[in-house]
Amino acid sequence: MSTLADGREAYAARRWPDAVGQYTAADQDEELPAGDLEQLAISVILTGRGSEGVDILARAHLKYLADGDYPAAARCAVWTGMNLILLGEPARSAGWLARARRIVEDLPEPCPFEGLLSVPVGLGALYQGDGASAAEAFTRTAELGRARGDADSAALGTLGLGQAKIMLGELDDGLALLDEAMVAVTVGEISPIPAGIIYCAVIETCHLAFDLRRAHEWTRALDRWCDAQQKLVAFSGQCQMHRAELYRLHGAWTEAIDAAKTAQDLAFRGDRMATYGGFYQQAEIHRLRGDFDDAEAAYLHAQDTGFPAQPGLALLRLAQGRPDQAQSLLRQAMDGIDPAYRRLMLAARVEIELAAGDAPAARAAVEELDSLCASIDMPLLHALAEQSQAAVLFHDGDPGAALVPLRRAWSRWLSLDAPFEAARCRALLARVCAALGDEESARLEREAARVVFSELGAAPALAELELAGPELAEPEQSAAAAADARTAPAPSTGNGPHHAADAGPLTARETEVVRLVSAGLSNRNIAAELFISEKTVARHLSNIFTKLGLTSRAAVTAYAYQHGLALTSRPA
């Protein structure tokens, strides 16, 4: 087989370094055909060498022009321009995009790739917060892509239209469009770079929409997509930063740090879009553990990318006993910021404003959260809103009114498998119960929170708990509270892990574990699939054995088949 044929085979198999090596060797013997130059450029970009890949893409463009293939030349010009945007070279990008537009306009027949020209227009509108203009641009991209048979254009347009609709408050329609774009990716219709863009954009948008279920599902899919490609750098760092965020939420903090550091390494190797998230997620774990110097350093590294490291840095200042500085930092960050990112800071705003003594500002933030819940019906958002509402009510001297939203928030955090946030609710519940004169419940709630904080290594939260009430429960009460803190059933939220109708006494997360056990996954593989620690998987299995009266994984598998919970195959 010739070197050129080897390069084509490696490209088709997504062995990017092999494709680069074989194509480069063939190119030294004789200049590659335009299509192979384009594939070499894509392979180079995917291995993290964006600048070099853009130069090769420019060569492919010129070769297509020389061959008289003007539509393909226009396609290369558009992708050269869009890659230059990612490389931070807007002037060169504008030149290439103008060149692509001129070629398309000069063609006597409609160009299959004309829709791609509207993608940068739509992105610009999204970044400026102009959802209506973005929707118009991406609708054009999608319609032209479908009409002229370009799957990449159709999928990118569908993605962008979904993002625009979410920005405009049309959440259900927007999320449905994101799912539609992802279908095109998962069935293999889309070329590699657009596929990676769609994966990462969908996951980011799901987080902005507080849609944890979709974020989980598509992060797992992205993880598998990245693993299926040899030494993929582009998009792999972003995958790791999203994994870190999910690990953090689920209390797998060691795994979160590892994923964050991997994201940073991949960012240095070429996936620049992972830089902020890699450092920010690392900083979050350091802050929660009380490693404040390390947290500050990581937050500042994240901020070096040009985006504010908020609300984390403000929460760090609060943990350091500097509420006024925390208040100032967060207020500055929230002034004029994109509304989609602003709403991610509202719960922290409540906490910081209360600590700084501005209860009216905290109430205003709670009102914003409540209004968001009316249009964004997501359990994660409801949990944040209810927890914040309870904190304000307690601060205002109404512990009785705080009790109901606080217990709702606790139940939601349990259903979302978020142990730290659930424990924070228990800590506040202890104070609420004490204020209501129920000292026994206060001790149990406090001990339940203490167990979780200790297991996680959440030193600042543990110290705050001790200051609020240092007394310990009796040993029997401690054991009961510890079990309750981790295993109490929570109501189905409709957005957590799959919970079958015949799951019996199991929680949603325990049901998910049963399903994965039935598919033959080990504890390690289950942990990776659910973004939790192996220790947490073992705890879930122990709870499952106890609740169902079973003693082995084989018995759990049999239970899964008997109750319609079994997976017929391992997750892809």
Image: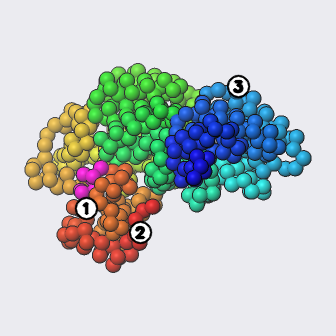
Q: Earlier in the sequence, mark 2 or mark 3?
A: 3
The residue located at (46%, 43%) in the rendering is 231
Task: Give the magenta range.
Answer: 533-541
Q: Amino acid at mark 2?
A: Ser
Specify few, some or many for label 2: CA neighbours under 10 Å numbering under 14, 14-19, or 20 or more.
few
The answer to which image quadrant residue 62 occupies is top right
Mark closer to the chain start, 1 or 2: 1
Q: Position of residue 269 (x, y in %)?
A: 47, 33
Drawn side of residue 261 relative to residue 268, left or right = left
Residue pointed to by mark 1: 541
- Which residue is labeled 3 in the image? 91
> Residue at coordinates 86% horizontally, 41% vertically from top-left?
105
Are the residues flagged by discs 2 and 3 in contact, CB closer than 8 Å? no
Residue at x-position 25% and y-position 61%: 541
Check disc 1 and report its element: helix, strand or loop: helix
Type of residue at label 3? Ala
Between 38 and 453, the one lying in front of the other is: 38
On screen, residue 106 versus residue 543, left or right, reads right
The coloring applied to the image is rainbow
Q: Considering the whole magenta stretch, tell me its main secondary structure.
A: helix
Residue in the picture at 83% in, 36% down: 102
Q: Which residue is mark 2?
A: 569
Residue 230 painted magenta? no
Earlier in the chain: of badge 3 and badge 1, it is 3
